[in-house]
Image (spheres, rainbow, N blue to C red):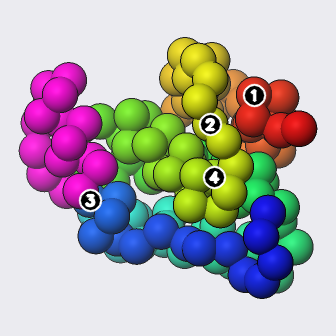
Amino acid sequence: MPLGDPKFLSREQVDKWHRASLEQYGGSEGLRSADSLESALGAPVNDYFYGAADPFESAASYAFHIAQAQAYLDGNKRTAILAALAFLQFNGITTQRDSMPLYEALVAVAERRMTKAELAERFRELFGP
């Protein structure tokens, strides 16, 4: 991780990736709850500043909270993965590996079978040194 605070994601970036995901894989457009999405996007910032989260915990926070918020009508898990991977890449961590284990993990998160801490560990296993 570079020195200094991490580069966090904007709502505009996440919305753009969500639209791209829908264009590529299909699904219904629309937002179920802007407040839920804003809360999900604020969680990694809060985790970093108040919980001393490392990059993998911050990425997991994006993925976990976006997936659980279900703020979009469709494509929440795909958007969660895209946001988490983008966060890692923006902050100097290479993510050029098979991301299928992440999709499976996000299904587990959405079904409440995986915690945020377990998801962070999955990110470390896949993309850590």
Q: Is residue 50 above or below residue 77?
A: below
Q: Position of residue 91 (x, y in %)?
A: 65, 62
Q: Could you tell which of marks 4 and 2 lies nearer the N-terminus?
A: 4
Residue type highlighted by circle 4: Leu
- Whole-angstrom CA distance, mark 4 to mark 2, is 7 Å
The residue shown at (12%, 34%) is 23
| Discs 2/1, front | 2
- The image shows residue 61 at horizontal and vertical percentages of 65, 55
CA distance for labels 2 and 3: 21 Å
User: Is the residue under label 3 in contact with that under label 1 (CB below 8 Å)?
Assistant: no
In the picture provided, is 104 more to the left or to the right than 22? right
Is 108 placed left or right of 124 in the picture? left
In the image, residue 100 above or below residue 60: above
Location of the C terminus by quadrant is top right
Q: Nearer the observer, disc 1 or disc 3? A: 1
Q: Is residue 18 left or right of residue 77?
A: left
Provide the residue span drawn in magenta. 16-32
Question: What residue is shown with label 2?
Answer: 95
What separation in Å lies between label 2 and label 1 (alpha carbons)? 8 Å
Where residue 127 appears, as percent x and y from the top left, is 75, 35
**Mark 1 lies on residue:** 126
Q: Earlier in the sequence, mark 3 or mark 4?
A: 3
Amino acid tagged 3: Asp
Write down the residue under mark 3. 15
Give residue 104's mark: none
Q: Amino acid at mark 1?
A: Leu
Where, by quadrant of the figure, is residue 119 drawn? top right
C-beta proximity under 8 Å, tags 1 and 4 = no
Can you say whether 9 is above or below 69 in the image? Answer: below
